[in-house]
């Protein structure tokens, strides 16, 4: 894939990566910007789970995460496909999502850290499942999230360790 500088896109062309995920039914989610995972909780002994009584396999919310490298790849593909006068909007995600408990368990395994869990009441307005459909960017630009949850956590953990060792 050829790389294209931002200046190659004319002011009348734009690519938007939606900051709202779509619900499993495909309708826009009511909850605003997508979630960014930080690994600050890994330095503490307890992580809060906001509700464990959702209609999901383990009772915790399911969210859609992608690796930062997959995100960068999507941006490069979009820039390469940028054409004056064309406006494209893409959702990015793995299409299935991971539960809060799944994420915590993988974090425990990758880091070797005993992460405690404190289940607290649900937050008002939190949907049980919030995942994105990447069908449009898959068919249009051939993009697909390629890294799994374990790779996301392992790379984030290495980054966090390197940053904290400075």
Image: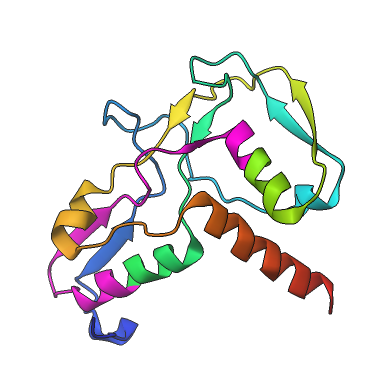
25 up-or-down from 152: above or below: above
Q: Position of residue 108 (x, y in %)?
A: 72, 45
Q: Residue at x 14, y 74 (%)?
A: 83
Image quadrant in which you'd find residue 165: bottom right
Q: Is residue 46 left or right of residue 21?
A: right
Q: What percent of the width, then of the height, locates residue 82?
A: 19, 73
Which of the image's four quarters has the C terminus? bottom right
User: Residue 77: where, in percent of width, then height?
Assistant: 26, 72
> At x 25% / y 54%, what residue is drawn?
89
Q: Residue at 40%, 42% (x, y): give it.
A: 20
Q: Is residue 23 above or below residue 95?
A: above
Q: Residue at x 37, y 47 (%)?
A: 94
Segment tinted magenta in the rendering? 76-103
**Could you tell me residue 103's position as x and y percent?**
61, 41
Q: Is residue 103 above or below residue 28?
A: below
Q: Is residue 95 magenta?
A: yes
């Amino acid at each position: 894939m050829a790389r294209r500088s931002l200046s190659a896109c004319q002011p009348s062309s734009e690519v938007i990566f939606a900051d709202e995920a779509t619900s499993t039914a495909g309708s826009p989610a009511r909850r605003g910007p997508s979630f960014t995972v930080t690994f600050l909780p890994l330095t503490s002994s307890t992580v809060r789970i906001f509700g464990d009584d959702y209609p999901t396999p383990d009772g915790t919310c399911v969210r859609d995460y992608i690796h930062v490298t997959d995100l960068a790849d999507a941006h490069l593909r979009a820039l390469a496909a940028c054409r004056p006068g064309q406006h494209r909007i893409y959702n990015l995600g793995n299409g299935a999502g991971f539960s809060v408990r799944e994420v915590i368990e993988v974090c425990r395994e990758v880091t070797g850290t005993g992460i405690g869990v404190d289940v607290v009441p649900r937050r008002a307005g939190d949907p049980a499942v919030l995942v994105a459909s990447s069908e449009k960017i898959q068919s249009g630009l051939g993009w697909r999230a390629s890294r799994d949850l374990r790779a996301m956590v392992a790379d984030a953990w290495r980054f966090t360790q390197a940053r904290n060792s400075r």
